Amino acid sequence: MRSIKLLIIVLSSIFVSSCIPHKDIVYLQNKEGKTNDTIPYDLSEVQKPYRIQIDDILNIRIKVLDQNNVQIFNPIGEANLNADSAERAYFDGFTVDVHGNIRIPNLGTLNVLGYTADEIEKMIEQKLLDEQFKETANIFVTVKLAGLRYTATGEVGNPGTITLFKERVNIFEAIANAGEIPMTGNRKEVMIIRQYPQGQKIHSLDLTDVNVMKSPYYYIQPNDMIYIKPLRQKSTGTGETAVSSLTTIATIVSLAATTVLLFTRL
């Protein structure tokens, strides 16, 4: 009788600990004890202007009244018409070297490390006015990142490096484009490994909390690495749901019963 009670306790413990709680897989929960489920109005988007880093690729376009005068500045990429958008950006864009510089025809080398796109636009425009054109040329310069490139790894559907052609991408969009997080992924401790001039830093996000939208890391940046940890249930090999846990327990009980019968018949 005592053995049966012990077996029931052990199996119950396995059942309780093996199931993944519903609260661990639901995004954007209101965890402040409020009765409504709406997103609080005081949630504000937090995103500082992105500052250019080494290995970034810049898409620079210069326009004046007579476009024939700026053809040398604006690459066409005719040699790569069959390439996809990311490849075209690589060949036609201006890559920031290890010293933080880019080389522009006729303008020479410009250091852009740590500057925003707006600041680089003004820098190039001023250099053109000083060396190439007069104000009557109506110079218009646009500088954009040639896609937002990041890497998603760990518990995601399609791990790898992804390039999105958008200026702003939040963490949910980034994960959705990586194939989503399976049930075995830890949504409470999503790691963002971010590049800084002084090195790399790791930041953590809880995607199950609605207040993640207040985080300064809610929007990803180029060259970010997103790592999703596995839940304990995956490492122990137990079931993800109640049904799969019951199946596991039934298998254990069946194996135990068979073992007992074999020993009693000896």
Image (cartoon, rainbow, N blue to C red):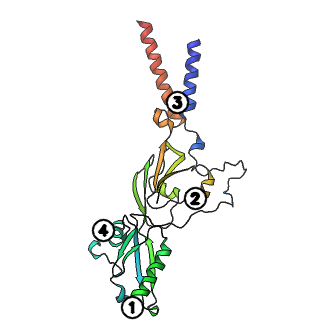
Q: Amino acid at mark 2?
A: Pro
Q: Is residue 220 left or right of residue 212?
A: left
Q: Residue 73, image x and y in percent?
A: 35, 81
- Nearest to the observer: residue 57 or residue 125: 125
Q: Residue at x 43, y 80 (%)?
A: 124
* Residue 246 numbered mark, or none: 3
Name the kind of residue labelled 3 in the image: Leu
> Which residue type does callout 1 highlight?
Asp
Write down the quadrant of residue 47 in the picture.
Answer: bottom right
Q: Amino acid at mark 4?
A: Ala
Q: Residue at x 43, y 15 (%)?
A: 259
Q: Residue 256, position in %: x, y?
A: 47, 18
**In this view, which residue lies farthest toward the top?**
266
Circle nearer the N terminus (1, 3) = 1
Drawn side of residue 79 relative to residue 38, left or right: left
**How far apart are labels 4 and 3 at the CA level?**
52 Å
Res 131 → quadrant? bottom left
- Rendered location of residue 245, percent (x, y): 51, 32
- Mark 4 burial class by Cα count in 10 Å: few <14, some 14-19, many 20+: some
Q: Which residue is mark 2?
A: 216
- Residue that mark 1 sits on: 66
Q: Nearer the viewer, residue 1 or 106?
A: 106
